[in-house]
Image (cartoon, grey):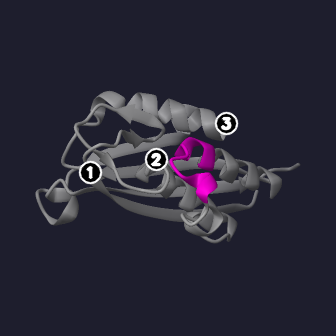
Amino acid sequence: MISRIGIGYDIHRLVDGRKLFLGGVEIPYVKGLLGHSDADVLLHAVGDAILGALGESDIGEHFPDSDPQYQDISSVELLKKIHLLAKAKGYVVGNIDMVVIAEEPVLSPFKKLIREKISAVLEIDAGRVSIKAKTNEGMGETGRKEAIASYAVVMIEKTDN
């Protein structure tokens, strides 16, 4: 079986007046992430990782912020499109390992729901999806609660189809 690996990263600024979405799940919090779409840094990192494993350009080239059709779009919809691209090229996601870096909010109550959401979109078992939440110990933009960042590593596998 042919396997390929990709890495993704994203960071967005926290602002008042926006809902917070991470991994396709709305997280109750006083601020949300600023972006052209819903600014879900976790799904953006996963999407970039899959695109990287496919040898494709990044999420910004596939879904440019200059295109009004992507204004406020759910990042779940973007990940679905990336999943369809992977399937069209004959690949499935083998597994995903993700890290979210945020001082707040506490994400442990939402990790199972995020795993289930991502696994459903990518049509894989939730056991193939790992998420870790870390703080930045008060350092940098994330440490000052100005932003949330995420990393994702994805392995994709060539199907026999």
Q: Residues within 10 Å of mark 1 (few under 14, many from 20)?
A: some
Q: Is residue 108 left or right of residue 90?
A: left
Residue drawn at 13 percent across, 58 percent down: 144
Q: Which residue is mark 3?
A: 123
Say which of marks 3 and 2 sits in front: 2
The answer to whether residue 70 is above or below residue 5 is: above
Q: Amino acid at mark 1?
A: Val
**On residue 27, which mark appears?**
none
Residue 56 at x, y percent in the picture: 67, 69
Looking at the image, which is closer to me, 40 or 37? 37
Residue 141: name its quadrant: bottom left
Nearer-N-terminus badge (3/2): 2
User: Does the magenta portion include 71?
Assistant: yes
> Which residue: 63% across, 53% down?
69
Whether tag 3 and tag 2 are in contact, CB under 8 A, the answer is: no
Up-down relation of residue 1 to residue 54 (above or below): above
Quadrant of the frame with the N terminus: bottom right
Q: Left or right of 4: which side holds 153?
A: left
**Residue placed under numbered mark 2 in the picture:** 38
Q: Tell me which segment is drawn in magenta.
A: 68-78
Q: Main secondary structure of the magenta part?
A: helix
The residue lying toward the viewer, choosing from 15 and 136, is 15
* Residue indicated by mark 1: 15
Write down the quadrant of residue 76 in the picture: top right
What amino acid is labelled 2 in the image?
Asp
* Residue located 61% across and 49% down the image: 78
- Label 2 neighbourhood size at 10 Å, few (<14), some (14-19), many (20+)? many
The residues tagged by marks 1 and 3 sit, at their Cα atoms, a distance apart of: 32 Å
Tell me, yes or no, whether the highlighted magenta stretch contains residue 74. Answer: yes
Describe residue 16's horizontal placement relative to residue 89 as left or right: left
